[in-house]
Amino acid sequence: MGQLNAYVGAAFLTPTQNPKITTIICMNIQPGQIRPADPQLVLGTLVANPTGRIVQCGDASVEVTASVVNE
């Protein structure tokens, strides 16, 4: 019998005059019951997005396609 994947999600609110909610869902790389690491809001100075922040999945997990939503 195959094992199912575990998922974790997050919603981040930007601390600006015009707040924006950014969401993401991440799936563990290996099937099983191990919970993926929490997604992170990463500052632009740490990634190839110097003007803002991005949301990325934690270690040993990948982003579920079309899971990032900005409102």
Image (cartoon, rainbow, N blue to C red):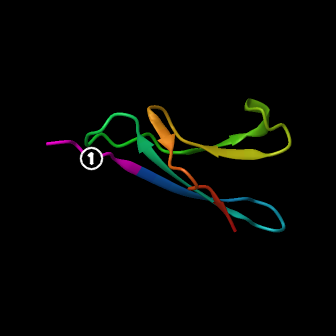
**Segment tinted magenta in the rendering:** 1-7
Q: Residue at x 54, y 50 (%)?
A: 65
User: Where's the N terminus, which quadrant?
Assistant: top left
Magenta stretch secondary structure, dominant: loop
The number of numbered badges drawn on the structure is 1
Question: Is 13 rendered above or below residue 29?
Answer: below
Q: Residue at x 19, y 42 (%)?
A: 2
Determine if the magenta segment contains residue 5.
yes
Left/right placement of residue 70 relative to residue 52 reads left
Task: Estimate how packed mark 1 is, as few (under 14), some (14 to 19) or many (20 or more) residues with alpha carbons within 10 Å.
Answer: few
Q: Position of residue 32 (x, y in %)?
A: 26, 40
Q: Position of residue 64 (x, y in %)?
A: 50, 49
User: Where's the C terminus, which quadrant?
Assistant: bottom right
Label 1 secondary element: loop
Q: Residue at x 73, y 59 (%)?
A: 14
Which is nearer the eye, 17 or 22?
Answer: 22
Q: Which residue is mark 1?
A: 4
User: Quadrant location of residue 44?
Assistant: top right
Left/right placement of residue 5 relative to residue 61 reads left
Left/right placement of residue 59 relative to residue 2 reads right
Question: Is 14 rendered above or below residue 2?
Answer: below
Which is nearer the eye, 43 or 34?
Answer: 34
Determine if the magenta segment contains residue 60.
no
Q: Position of residue 49 (x, y in %)?
A: 79, 38
Query: In the current view of this chain or complex, which residue is farthest to the front?
Result: 1
Q: Residue at x 44, y 32 (%)?
A: 60
Query: In the current view of this chain or complex, which residue is farthest to the left?
Result: 1
User: Quadrant location of residue 21?
Assistant: bottom right
Q: Position of residue 37 (x, y in %)?
A: 44, 40
* Kind of residue sitting beneath label 1: Leu
